[in-house]
């Protein structure tokens, strides 16, 4: 029997969920509430418009509003959901009052962590998310000369690259010893940091943010490394699950701060689902909860949550987290986790690494690819990988995440077949070289 599903959130998870509800049964009613003026655009492209690699924000829109109307998805723009009543199956919407639902999908996403220093209310602090605000900030960037990027998170990495390429005097401030220190190993990020210096960026690691300073608008950023000039401060702090509504409604929050869901993306309350950056999911290797994954995870989770809310049955599996991003003049990527995380979690591992090439050595445009494979030391099953190169990183990250998921060993990878075609692949695939090197470090006969 058709249901009425409300979706709170118009990001990747919310739009995925709305489509999932309709896919389960086209007769279902689905209503989406979003604070924003738009849905169906890729926030992921915003840093590249700021960096002038994409020529307009309009290119980031994936669908027009009319397309959702035609798909039977009723989207209420600029409508804030103020509360959820799970007993009476109602939400209260600003300007609309109480709205009833049969099923609810919470896809409220993330907020950037509060930098927690004086001056947070000044103008000139840019939190990159809403495309309309990005369009306005891009005009500010036309006249800005100096920028401070606060924290070397994935977005901080992209914004540092974009602003340095755009010609701003760009300072990156982070309390940790290297960029992306929570996820990326220092040897993988080292060439990226060198390339930022070549682009003219100023790197302030092991540096604490102390205050944003200025009269009404920020003009400098105080740090433990001194005062940095700032016509604009781009706040790229860690993503935090936006769960205040759900927590007030009594849904269970897990140790990472994300909403607890089962494999159907169902929360701890009947008929309420959650998806995207507001939820936490088990990591496939450690089975520990992780949150703050990527837009592709959010969209896929949304589709599962919506399909189940709409009366279907789908399961979302533990995550093996393929990831990748351009960074400076390089592309970095990986799957699962690297040495730093494995060490922090006390997970035993062995390493196989190699520096290979992306094409035949004689073919124009050939690039270096550094690959590091982590395997558990007894069966030599792959548990993680990290890479730095300039091409082919995304495809290797996707493949290696699948290799971790299906339990491939270093022995399997060392004997892997590979494409050799001068313009697109070398005779010796770097993954194979890394696996072989790892095996050579094992005492003979083991
Ligand atoms: C600048 C930027 C770059 C990114 N780059 C990448 C990338 O390269 N690759 C990648 O995979 N992902 C990228 N992402 C995606 C990102 O990291 C997240 O994983 C993704 O946005 C999560 O989607 P979501 O739908 O869960 O949440 P969000 O995108 O946070 O959307 C949350 C939605 O909920 C709405 N909302 C929240 N509370 C309420 C309320 N009370 N009432 C009404 N509406 C509400 C908001 O208006 C919004 O529509 C990027 C995101 C940004 C902002």
Image (cartoon, rainbow, N blue to C red):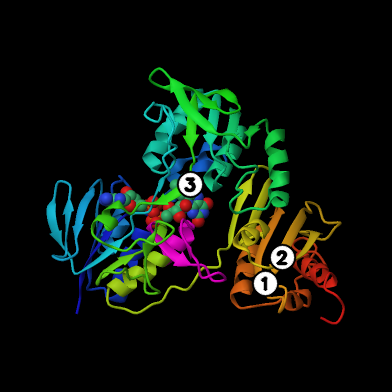
Screen quadrant of the C terminus: bottom right
Q: Secondary structure at mark 2?
A: strand
Instruction: Give the number of the disc on residue 373.
Output: 2
Look at mark 3 in the image and give the residue it sits on. Answer: 238
In depth, the one of 53 and 8 nearer the eye is 8
Where is residue 361? Give x, y as percent.
Answer: 85, 58
Q: Which residues are magenta?
A: 278-300
Q: Earlier in the sequence, mark 2 or mark 1?
A: 2
Q: Is residue 408 above or below residue 437?
A: below
As measured in the structure, the alpha-carbon distance from the residue carrying label 1 to the one carrying label 3 is: 28 Å
Q: Secondary structure at mark 1?
A: strand
CB under 8 Å between discs 2 and 3: no
Task: State which quadrant residue 382 falls in.
Answer: bottom right
Where is residue 261? Give x, y as percent.
Answer: 37, 68
| Residue at 45 percent of width and 66 percent of height | 281
CB under 8 Å between discs 2 and 1: yes
In depth, the one of 78 and 263 nearer the eye is 263
Q: Is residue 269 above or below residue 112?
A: below
Screen quadrant of the N terminus: bottom left
Residues packed near mark 1 inside 10 Å, few (<14), some (14 to 19) or many (20 plus):
many
| Residue at 70 percent of width and 34 percent of height | 197
């Amino acid at each position: 029997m058709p249901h009425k599903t409300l979706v709170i959130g118009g990001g990747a998870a919310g739009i995925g969920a709305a489509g999932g509800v309709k896919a389960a049964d086209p007769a279902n009613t689905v209503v989406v509430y979003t604070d924003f003026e738009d849905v169906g655009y890729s926030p992921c492209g915003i840093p590249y418009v700021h960096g002038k690699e994409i020529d307009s924000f309009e290119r980031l829109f994936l669908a027009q509003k009319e397309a959702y109307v035609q798909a039977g998805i009723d989207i209420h723009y600029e409508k804030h959901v103020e509360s959820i009543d799970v007993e009476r199956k109602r939400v209260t919407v600003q300007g609309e009052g109480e709205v009833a639902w049969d099923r609810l999908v919470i896809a409220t996403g993330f907020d950037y962590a509060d930098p927690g220093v004086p001056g947070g209310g000044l103008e000139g602090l840019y939190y990159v998310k809403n495309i309309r605000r990005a369009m306005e900030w891009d005009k500010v960037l036309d006249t800005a000369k100096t920028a401070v990027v606060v924290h070397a998170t994935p977005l901080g990495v992209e914004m540092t690259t974009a602003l340095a390429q755009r010609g701003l005097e760009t300072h990156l401030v982070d309390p940790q010893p290297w960029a992306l220190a929570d996820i990326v190993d220092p040897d993988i990020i080292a060439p990226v940091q060198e390339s930022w210096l070549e682009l003219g960026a100023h790197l302030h690691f092991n540096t604490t943010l102390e205050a944003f300073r200025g009269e009404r608008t920020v003009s400098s950023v105080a740090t433990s490394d001194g005062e940095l000039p700032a016509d604009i401060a781009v706040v790229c702090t860690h993503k935090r699950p936006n769960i205040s509504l759900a927590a007030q409604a009594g849904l269970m929050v897990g140790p990472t701060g994300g909403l607890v869901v089962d494999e159907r993306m169902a929360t701890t309350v009947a008929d309420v689902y959650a998806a995207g950056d507001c939820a936490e999911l088990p990591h496939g290797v450690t089975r520990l909860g992780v949150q703050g994954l990527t837009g592709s995870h959010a969209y896929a989770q949304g589709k599962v949550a919506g399909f189940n809310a709409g009366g279907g049955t789908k399961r979302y599996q533990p995550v093996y987290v393929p990831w990748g991003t351009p960074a400076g003049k390089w592309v970095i990527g990986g799957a699962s986790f690297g040495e730093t995380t494995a060490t922090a979690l006390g997970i035993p591992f062995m390493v196989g690494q190699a520096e290979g090439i992306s094409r035949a050595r004689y073919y124009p445009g050939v690039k270096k690819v550094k690959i590091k494979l982590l395997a558990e030391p007894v069966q030599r099953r792959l548990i993680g990988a990290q890479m730095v190169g300039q091409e082919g990183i995304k495809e290797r990250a996707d493949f290696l995440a699948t290799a971790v998921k299906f339990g491939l060993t270093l022995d399997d990878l060392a004997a892997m077949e590979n494409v050799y075609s001068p313009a697109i692949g070398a005779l010796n695939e770097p993954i194979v070289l890394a696996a072989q090197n790892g095996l050579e470090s094992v005492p003979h006969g083991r």
